[in-house]
C-alpha cells in the first residue's frame, strides 16, 4: 500500500527530508517504523526502538499497533516539552 510519511523536528533532520511517499508491506505503525529502521543510516538511529518516538496516523496520536490503510498519512516526531 502507499502511505505518506512526514518527519518533524530532529526526525526531519535525521531522515534528510520532511516527507516521503512510500510503498509498504507494513500493516501497522510499528511495522512501518521497523521497515524504515531497516533502511539503515541516521534515520534508523533516530527511529530506533531505544528512542522515544511519537506517532500520528492521519493527524491523530496513535499507538504502535494501530493499522495503516491505503493513502494514510503517518507522522513521526520526538516527544515535545513546553512551558
Image (cartoon, rainbow, N blue to C red):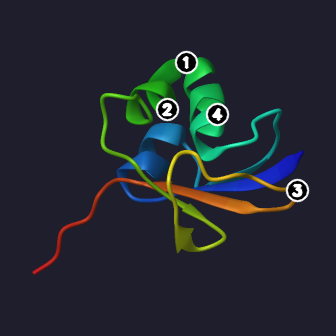
Within 10 Å of disc 4 (Cα), the crowding (few <14, some 14-19, many 20+) is some
Q: What residue lies at 51% left-to-right and 21% top-to-bottom? A: 41
Above or below: residue 61 compared with residue 14: below
Q: Secondary structure at mark 3?
A: loop
Q: CA distance from mark 3 to mark 1?
A: 25 Å
Q: Mark 3 or mark 2, which has the lower sequence index?
A: 2
Mark 2 or 4, nearer chain start? 4
Q: Secondary structure at mark 4?
A: helix
Counting residues from the start of the chain, the first of labels 3 and 1 encountered is: 1
What residue sits right under mark 4 in the picture? 31
The label shown at residue 43 is 2
Foreground label between 2 and 4: 4
Q: Is residue 49 left or right of 18 when viewed as pictured?
A: left
Determine whether the residue tagged by mark 1 lies in a helix, strand or loop: loop
Q: Residue at 88% of width from left, 56% of height from top?
A: 70
Mark 3 in CB contact with mark 1 (< 8 angstroms): no
Which residue does the image show at 31% across and 36% down from the upper left?
Answer: 51
Residue corresponding to mark 3 = 70
Q: Which residue is mark 1?
A: 40
Left or right of residue 25: residue 82: left
Amino acid at each position: 500500500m502507499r502511505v505518506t510519511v512526514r518527519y518533524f523536528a530532529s526526525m526531519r533532520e535525521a531522515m534528510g527530508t520532511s516527507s516521503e511517499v512510500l510503498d509498504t508491506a507494513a500493516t501497522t505503525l510499528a511495522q512501518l517504523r521497523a521497515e524504515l529502521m531497516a533502511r539503515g543510516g541516521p534515520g534508523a538511529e533516530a527511529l530506533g526502538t531505544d528512542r522515544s518516538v511519537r506517532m500520528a496516523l492521519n493527524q491523530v496520536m496513535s499507538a504502535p499497533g494501530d493499522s495503516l490503510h491505503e493513502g494514510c498519512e503517518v507522522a513521526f516526531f520526538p516527544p515535545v516539552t513546553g512551558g
